[in-house]
Image (spheres, coloured by chain):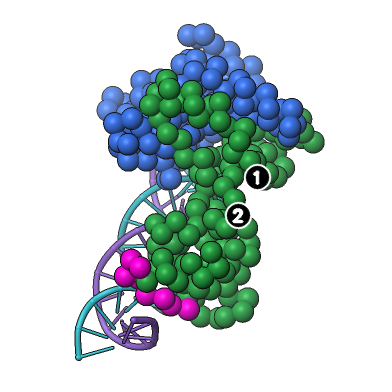
Chain colours: A blue, B green, C purple, D cyan
Amino acid sequence: MTEDWREKLRGRGYRLTPQRELILDAVDTLGHATPDEVLAEVRKRSSALNISTVYRTLEVLEGLGLVRHAHLSDRAPTYHSVRDHEHFHLVCRNCHEVVSVDPDVLSPLLERLRADHAFTADVGHLTVFGTCGSCS
Amino acid sequence: MTEDWREKLRGRGYRLTPQRELILDAVDTLGHATPDEVLAEVRKRSSALNISTVYRTLEVLEGLGLVRHAHLSDRAPTYHSVRDHEHFHLVCRNCHEVVSVDPDVLSPLLERLRADHAFTADVGHLTVFGTCGSCS
DNA sequence: CTTGTTGCAAACTTTTTGCATACAC
DNA sequence: GTGTATGCAAAAAGTTTGCAACAAG
């Protein structure tokens, strides 16, 4: 999917700008990042990019399915690339460690939610807060 | 546990103020409410209460285990009373319906997280986003 | 050339903080 | 009386918006 994003953008009438490429690369590089962190990462190399462009671009990229966001703290949303295979997150309340977990373990839950509540869960957005081994 | 909160506050050296009582009542009444909504609810009856007191009080009450919060939107946190038996939430991305679900369905997941990742999940804080039956 | 995109600055929303006053104990 | 809690106003943090200038197609 390396060049896939170009087609996705063009395909929906979006333009292919350097800013969009830089932001997508930054999200890839960082793994999990808030809009602020994305801005900082991009500015390490290329200087000119505005925070409002970061917000607008992340929104577009998420609409195209190129990035996703989850809430890994009580505060800012964090974006991650979709090149990482789909996963959800465990976050330790104490040490703030973040662990990415394979969605397989969710299958039984997802099926019950579908059966009992006709509800289709969005796995990629899921974050489970709690306490990790070393902190308990 | 009707009068329990008085003891919990006093027991830890906190003072028992009318504001704290009003806020706790409002959370009980509202079910799920953002700090803003708590303020509005309290002001329906008693006029004088400041938003910063709401924030500070909810923090204290959560520390005492008298209320809990979860994130039911990408924005504000919502607080709920712990008199409701423990539950987690399903939130529909489309119609924003909120469903409270019994934690039993989570047992298989919780055990796997404990076994595989030594992680103890905080059920009360959990929110699962997705699409409800009528919206899919 | 046309229209989507960006940068900039300002507005907004939500939450936090400092400090003087008020009140629970 | 003593020290915590509150109100107020200002600051901080995060996000959105309007608009003129710019640049991708």
- Disc 2 and disc 1 in contact, CB within 8 angstroms: yes
Residue where numbered disc 2 is placed: B84
Question: Residue drawn 59% across and 50% down?
Answer: B85
Q: Nearer the viewer, residue A19 or D23?
A: A19
Q: The residue under label 2 is which amino acid type? A: Asp
Question: Residue drawn 43% across and 27% down?
Answer: B114
Where residue B119 sits in the image (x, y, percent)? 40, 30
Vertical position of residue A84 compared to residue B63: above or below: above
Vertical position of residue B99 compared to residue B2: above or below: above
Which portion, as a residue range, is magenta?
B11-18
What distance separates the C-alpha of mark 2 from that of mark 1?
Answer: 10 Å
Residue B114 seen from this side = yes
Residue where numbered disc 1 is placed: B100
Q: Is residue B90 magenta?
A: no
Where residue A111 sits in the image (x, y, percent)? 68, 23
Q: Nearer the viewer, mark 2 or mark 1?
A: 2
Q: Earlier in the sequence, mark 2 or mark 1?
A: 2
Say which element carries label 1.
strand
Q: Does residue C16 appear left or right of residue A125 in this picture? A: left
Q: The residue under label 1 is which amino acid type? A: Ser
Residue A40 seen from this side = no
Quadrant of the rendered structure where residue A92 is? top left
